[in-house]
Amino acid sequence: MKICCIGAGYVGGPTMAMIAYKCPEVTVTVVDVLPEKIDAWNSDDLPVFEPGLDEVVKVARGRNLFFSTDRKKAIKEADIIFVSVGTPTKSYGAGAGRAADMVYVENSAREIAEAAESSKIVVEKSTIPVRTAESLKTVLHANTKPGIRFDVLSNPEFLAEGTAVEDLKDPDRVLVGGEETPEGKKAIETLVSVYANWIPRDSIITTNLWSSELSKLVANAFLAQRISSINSISALCEATGANVDQVAFAIGKDSRIGSKFLKSSVGFGGSCFQKDLLNLVYLCEHFGLPEVAQYWQGVIDINDWQKRRFSSNIATSLFNTVNGKRIAMLGFAFKKDTNDTRESAAIYVGRDLIEEQANLAIYDPKVNKGQIYRELIGEESDQNQQIEVCEDPYQAAQGAHALAILTEWDAFRDLDFQRIFDQMVKPAFVFDGRNILDHSKLREIGFTVQAIGR
Ligand code: NAD
Ligand code: UGA
């Protein structure tokens, strides 16, 4: 069997590496339009940082895992083609700022139709609006040679960044949606047989196409909703003297609520939660359900408010002005164990502080300088007087009025805070946006500590 994956990004690269690793008899080729990305996948410096990924790629690459820019050849030879391209929020025209931009998915379908010389199973791996398979099938069949058949399946990806390898090795479930026709069922079985090489059959769920497509958006919406729920309560905790971590622990002990995804924070980031929620809101409006749209919009609104609340609290606490003050920002990735900064809360907090004329000293163990500049000011310029990207946390803290924790990197827990305190302007403030530090110890050293929900 031959598999091709269009899109060598955060999802395409790791998912295909795992399929190749677990199925040595399947040849897997991942293609991308960006030659530099393919070069990186073929090098020792992979474009995606994920714990354990290097080892998986090392075993399979060159054996049955290949990264290539020759899209036509890979499509032509494949039995199964995964479409794993980006579906960002549309930035223009109708639905701008909310609907998913389907241009890359449609282009992929056109490329498949043009290059295919035999029948294929086409798998939606990207997160897409419900009923996309319909458009995909229309584009595929309208542009291909006679006698060629395309079966479209939905197989959304549920991996989380930072734990991608573990999530792929041992997923809670794999979801495959397809048509309820004999051909559709055969296509579903073919894809299921690939995953069954390492995933127990009862963890592989099969549904109709629309349920599968919609389940992906709903799963992300429910996860994001939990974070906004606990973050909304964090404000109430601050006003009343309750401690949000204690509240989360107490309610999480109820097995109906469960303990996961109740960590209050400076706000959720990442490339998907906001994008998928916006898409869900847009779909609800499209289908004439304004009340449902409004309900899910609330999850986004609370998240935006939480990020703003954090930056304005820094300014208020520093005697109502951060003008000319150095603020050390520790962490820039949207969560620990990833180099991904897309929609990171750090970007919004950083921009707010820049607006207030603060000077930022930023340190993140995995995010490079250029990326930080690009996210904050849209270009790679170290001429910017307000931003300094530092080599280590101590350099960032040197002469700072405040230290703000934006990402929950484990290494931040074990810093030498006495050394940091000694280097800072007094009173020295800590704003713990992730509630990961030992606050009583910091207070003993002399810091003024502010945390989320306490
Ligand atoms: P990404 O931007 O990292 O990767 C997409 C890749 O597709 C890019 O490298 C781009 O160059 C390539 N591409 C675009 N058009 C192409 C074409 N015609 N031919 C070949 N390559 C093309 O995006 P991602 O994070 O991997 O996300 C992909 C999809 O998976 C999105 O729909 C996203 O919502 C979904 N998803 C992402 C995650 C995640 O953790 N990042 C998890 C689950 C689902
Ligand atoms: C999320 C989902 O968890 C995945 O199942 C899904 O496949 C993926 O989106 C996607 O579709 O892209 P991801 O965004 O990689 O994965 O990471 P999460 O662990 O979900 O974290 C998202 C954000 O929420 C991070 O900023 C994180 O710090 C924050 N978060 C998470 C909290 O603030 N509190 C929590 O309790 C959990």
Image (cartoon, rainbow, N blue to C red):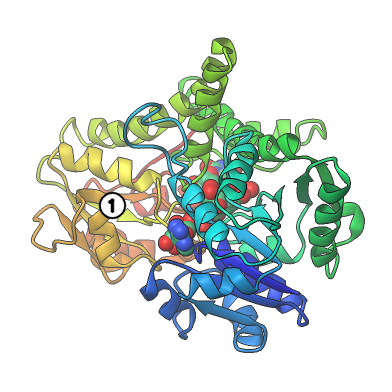
Identify the residue shown where x is 42% and y is 80%: 39
Please name whichever residue, 289 or 191, is drawn nearer the observer in this view of the structure. Answer: 191
Please name whichever residue, 266 or 139, is drawn nearer the observer in this view of the structure. Answer: 139
Q: Image height check: is 426 above or below 37?
A: above
Residue 34, percent from left and from top: 38, 68
Quadrant position of residue 180:
top right
Judged from the image, the secondary structure of the residue bearing numbered disc 1 is helix
Residue named by callout 1: 375
Furthest toward the front, the residue is 146
Amino acid type for the residue under numbered disc 1: Glu
State the quadrant of the N terminus: bottom right
Residue 32, percent from left and from top: 46, 67
Residue 31, percent from left and from top: 51, 70
Apparent side of residue 104 relative to residue 58 in the rendered image (left or right): left
Q: Image height check: is 332 above or below 429?
A: below
Identify the residue shown where x is 80% and y is 55%: 187
Furthest toward the bottom, the residue is 62
Identify the residue shown where x is 83% and y is 46%: 206
Please name whichever residue, 424 or 261, is drawn nearer the observer in this view of the structure. Answer: 261
Residue 377, percent from left and from top: 19, 50
Identify the residue shown where x is 77% and y is 45%: 178
Please name whichever residue, 245 or 210, is drawn nearer the observer in this view of the structure. Answer: 210
Q: Is residue 303 visible?
A: yes
